[in-house]
Amino acid sequence: MTATEMKERLVGRALKRREDPKLITGHGNYLDDIKLPGMLHIALVRSPHAHAKIVSIDASKALAMPGVVAVFTGKDMLDINPMPAAWQAAGVKNYPVPPRALAVDKVALVGDPVAMVVAENRYIARDAADAVEVEYEPLPAVVDARKAVEPGAPQIHEAAPNNIVFEWECGNKAAADAAIASAEVVVKEEIINQRLIPTPMETRGSIARYDATTGEWTVWMTSQAPHVHRLLLTAFVFGVPETKLRCIAPNVGGGFGQKIFCYNDMAFTMWAARKLGRPVKFVEDRSENYKYSTHGRDHITEAELAGTRDGKITGLRVKTWANIGAYFSTVAAGIPTTLYGRIITGVYKIPAAYVHVTGAYTNTAMVDAYRGAGRPEASYLIERMVDRFAAEIGMDPAEVRRKNYIQPEDFPYDNGLGLLPYDSGNYEPALNKALEIAGYAEFRKQQAELRKQGRYLGIGISSYVEICGIAPSAWMGGQGWGAGLWESANVRVHLTGKVVVTTGSLPHGQGLETTFAQIVADELGVPYEDVEVQWGDTQGTPFGYGTYGSRSLAVGGVAIKRSVDKIKEKARKLAAHLLEANEADIVFENGRAYVKGSPDKGKTIGELAAAAAVAYNLPPGMEPFLDETSYYDPPNCTFPFGTHVCIVEVDPETGHVKLLRYIAVDDCGNQINPLIVEGQIHGGIAQGLAQALYEGAVYNEDGQLLTGTLMDYAVPTAAMVPHIETDHTVTPSPVNPLGVKGAGEAGTIASAQCVMNAIIDALAPFGVKHLQMPATPERIWRAIHGK
Amino acid sequence: MIPAPFDYYAPTSLAEALTLLQRHGDDAKILAGGHSLLPAMKLRLASPSVLIDINKVDELRGIKVNGTVEIGAMTTWSAIEHHAALAKACPAMADAVGLIGDIQVRNRGTIGGSLAHADPAADMPAVVLAVDAQIHVEGPNGPRAIAAADFFTDMLSTALEPGEIITSITFNSHGAGEGSAYAKFPHPASRYAIVGAAAYVKLENGQVTACRVAITGAGPKAERQPAVEQALIGTDGSADAVAAAAAHAGEGMDMLGDIHASEEYRRAMCKVYAKRALLKAIERAR
Ligand SMILES: Cc1cc2nc3c(=O)[nH]c(=O)nc-3n(C[C@H](O)[C@H](O)[C@H](O)COP(=O)(O)OP(=O)(O)OC[C@H]3O[C@@H](n4cnc5c(N)ncnc54)[C@H](O)[C@@H]3O)c2cc1C
């Protein structure tokens, strides 16, 4: 290769994921694969009641069983603090009651752990847990967020009067009230965004080992953010120096948000390992995951949208009750506030909007971020209301959208809800493209024709914008987030020219190992195979915030690029020295530094790395080695967008929905790896259409989870997900040098309302204006038959 | 997800299995595909202290099709699904098996296990009722045959006596003018039947001369639908006649209701699925 010949760029290419062969052939190393010498196993005694006082706990029978090492209760662990409440609602009083390692004196949900058995193996532990006798005094329970804050509702925590976690608002109430009072048309709807269970393939757990000689722990955890967990567990829960804990996330089998949070098992395994002097392991089974690990969504909303007869939206007023569950999970309050209320107007220019959110404790599993986290709830709401409005004024829903879109010249766009400005966007081309692929005009004719034959087809449109690259630290600090939110990266070029990248991101299914290697290989001009990406161990990686909020490329990836830039800068200096040229005359291209004008006079990055590593001949003052670290705090979030369209047919006899077509046109800025983007979109859509059609966590009035197993809770199988037709537009983000926005959650954020709008469109001849999710056959059948 | 402790035996002959079953009595359970028994044990809804695994008993496996069909109790759904002659001899069975769970479930689950378990939402009970199968069992008092119509006694209960093992299922292959079909409303999570309807019809000279319809999923056990059958026999099997007959589906049945389908809805779906199964069966008979 000559110096001027371009190495083929990898960015933009659909490379297969390099992490996959190991994972899909069963060679991954997940938490439950780890077996330490002398390791003990924990089984929990969990409450069968949703709300009760603990009268007594008798572990004598369990302790007498062979192989049982110890039984502990919440009272034994009063020397450690409750889990931290890291993200509280901004600007208002919060009443955070996070869970303790084990419940003390009372339980607040079915599955609340009251005691833990530690035994030689998991089987003994489980049998012994059954032998622990707990006497409860049951109390009345409440599971519905709106009912929980009504007078006379059962009171769950003394520290949270009326079960209120926070009351928060954004926007302009007076303006929204006025817009609604004076509007030509107002549509009003109660919109329920039902509770979902994230269901990562791998459940959660922790293994803790304690070294009494040094007072240090190592904890293996199913975690999307091990550095954050290290910080929270040491500084807040145990009150020990941060340096006393090493956290390791091995391969993580999916998270969807559920593994962001600091859970009680991290604390009780650490506590028990220290107490017993042996490693201890806790791994949830699926039933425990369903009962106790966090759920998502669960909003009840009263929404009013005002507009003119000719389709201009003039106001939006939203009142939401957000179910927080029995305790305050780590970032629970940020989701239904900043990540929901502040983006409620979506892709539309709505002059007056106001959102009020009440966070409520109930006797249910904790609710926290789940793929999309707040933004799916917001998009669902606005996109249902826009369709509702279009139907009310008899205007084509595509036309209403066009009339109200934020226009390209409006960017950066301030939506008036306290969000950072939308970075860039061009909404109409994505809509046009999606409608064109769908054959919209033709479909409308066909739809009318088929209706005459008693066939009910519908088309749904969903235009969305979301918040990715969750960051700037200063802004997030103002939003109640208790820390910074930048990302770190270290890049080293070793003596052999091989490149090691360590990232504070925590890939757990996003394909980041591949994406990051593509960026580094291009930027440094080294072979893709020579780039190794490492993560997941607090020992050996710089502090980082982890993977969630579609931030790992737009923040973590950019941190990597910045480290590479610094490496190139140093390499250039070194090249100038070795080539006896002026630094200003050195060109760095295709992995090679050469003197401008004489491309044959140069040094490859490998040669420069070796020179830097042996350090025989460095310019004065230069330190050895090519090794650079960056902490990247972006100036803004990024705002991907797009339009999805879907076509359904409803069987009027049974209410079954058939998804005939699903079209996704997404704009996530520049795409590093289109195959991975498409995979993320597919997975996201599967989860969103599952919310529309299948999934829903149901509690009965007593707080028993009726959808407690995968035989009852309908996660779709591949056969239930249609072929997805993907396309895209590209509007680079001006926020970061890669021009990327993020794609991890977009599919979920766009899809539930797309399917619901299509179903409701299909049901228009029956006078149906709205349906709650999931649109089960029975719900649809009742709507059709007026039952 | 961790079952209580148990002892495990893996006999290689039916005789050996029967002896073990007799020796351990009520404490023992036969293990076939394990797709109902093991989940129940993991959730500790069942805690047998002895498991007798009959997967190595080869004599219980296999399909024979001539004038009659004989299916060994340990035959898996996937073996049934991929048997071309059986699909011709009894399309309802092929319809039903193709809709059971997913591929993994069909690779493990057995017809004998399904019938013995008598899950109210299982598919096969409706099919064996509609084809009027004989269920062959062997126990301490030797072999006997039980008519499908007498086999399902209540929710999760059958006419099996203690110590008895199902050995095979037999029924007549369809001949000229005979047709059958199975139509199912699957549970969105488990894929079991919320309502499943199996129909068998015989047409002679354009007239329905025999008809058996059975519904599963809707009530505590799979049940024949005599009112539907009687209303259809003697008609020409036209769409109108079928709709009129199917309107009797679910009559006299105790309907189940749950978060996935209420009693009222299940009742309505009995009629729809009985109609769909009958229309298909008639189309095949013609
Ligand atoms: C995810 C999932 C989805 C499913 N979906 C469906 C579905 O859509 N439709 C459907 O019909 N079924 C469904 N099933 C059930 C499955 O089809 C099995 O057939 C059924 O569980 C029983 O068969 P088995 O061989 O697994 O029996 P096992 O679980 O081994 O045994 C069940 C019971 O029968 C007894 N038993 C077994 N064999 C004999 C015998 N020969 N004689 C006497 N007693 C015996 C056992 O002792 C036990 O009590 C599903 C199961 C799962 C796990």
Image (cartoon, grey):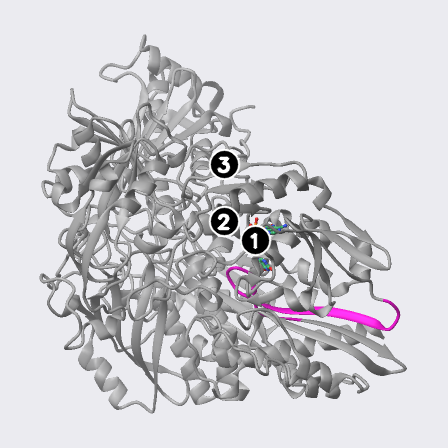
Q: Is residue B218 left or right of residue A520?
A: right
The first of marks 1 and 2 along the sequence is 2
Q: What residue would you read off at disc 1?
A: B162
Q: Label 2, label 3: how many angstroms apart (C-alpha)? A: 44 Å
Circles 1, 2 touching at the beta carbon (< 8 Å):
yes
Q: Secondary structure at mark 2?
A: helix
Residue in the image at 26% along x and 66% along y: A323
- The location of residue B180, given as percent across then percent down, is 76, 69
Count of number-bearing discs: 3
Within-10-Å neighbours for mark 1: few <14, some 14–19, many 20+: few
Query: Residue B280 got which mark?
Result: none
**For the residues carrying marks 2 and 3, which lies nearer the camera in this image?**
2
Do dots 3 and 1 share one subunit?
Answer: no
**Chain letter for mark 2:** B
Within-10-Å neighbours for mark 2: few <14, some 14–19, many 20+: few
Location of the N terminus of chain A (image quadrant)? top right
Query: Main SS type for the magenta part?
Result: strand
In the rendered image, the residue lying farthest to the front is B141
**Chain letter for mark 1:** B
Q: Label 3, label 1: how many angstroms apart (C-alpha)? A: 47 Å
Do dots 1 and 2 share one subunit?
Answer: yes
Q: What residue would you read off at disc 2?
A: B26
What stretch of residues is rendered in magenta?
B175-197
- The location of residue B44, given as percent across then percent down, is 41, 50
Q: Is residue A232 left or right of residue A752?
A: left
Q: Is residue A388 above or below residue A541?
A: below
Q: What residue would you read off at disc 3?
A: A23
Residue in the image at 67% along x and 40% along y: B15
**For the residues carrying marks 3 and 1, which lies nearer the camera in this image?**
1
**For residue A69, what is the image quadrant?**
top left
Q: Label 1, label 2: how many angstroms apart (C-alpha)? A: 8 Å
